[in-house]
Image (cartoon, rainbow, N blue to C red):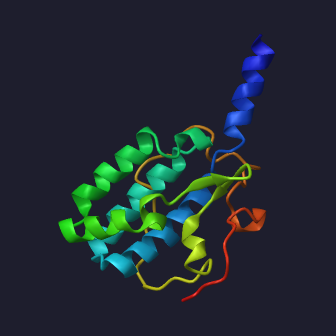
Amino acid sequence: MIFLVLLMTTAITAHSMNYNTAREEALFLSDKMAYELGLSDAQYESVYRINLDYLLHMTSHRDLHGRWWDVRNRDLRLVLSHPQYARFISINYFYRPLSWHSGRWYFPIYDRYAHGRMLRHHPHPSAPHHAAPHGHGAPGHHHGTPHGGSHHHSHSRR
């Protein structure tokens, strides 16, 4: 019985995003949100931290549109103006920035933008607002990283 619980725990955490991956993806997503939604520098910082927090709490595909997605949307509603929030929820790759496809994390933003190309030159946030949740800094958890090839992104149309 203990073996089965351990095996299930390992299977769930195997899909967790490590801190570096979550940080990279939160920066990229926030950069595109800043560009398309016209965020101020202060909004950009807040949006980055909200996106990072959401991504760090993803441990399996069951987390995608659960509690942490609701928390993310609630927090973004507080940071964005009414017109910005209305636009945000109308753009699916912002509103649902992460999905699960073929056993891997999938970032729909890469259907629109080439990976790695930043559009605005914001100062990159230097430190996380809190420590990563347990298990997110473990080596070997590379699902969703550009090196793991699991973005499923096409090259940019921009």
Relative height, residue 117 to residue 85 (above, below): below
Residue 24 visible in this rendered orientation of the protein = no
Percent from the top left, x then y, of residue 93?
Answer: 48, 66
Quadrant of the frame with the C terminus: bottom right
Residue 97 visible in this rendered orientation of the protein = yes
Of residues 95 and 43, the one nearer the viewer is 95
Percent from the top left, x then y, of residue 60?
Answer: 62, 41
Q: Residue at x 30, y 76 (%)?
A: 39
Of residues 64 and 147, the one nearer the viewer is 64
Of residues 124 and 80, the one nearer the viewer is 80
- As drawn, the residue found furthest toward the left would be 82
Residue 62 sits in quarter: top right
Relative height, residue 84 to residue 79 (above, below): below
Locate residue 17 relative to residue 88 in the image: left or right.
right
Relative height, residue 134 to residue 9 (above, below): below
Quadrant of the frame with the N terminus: top right
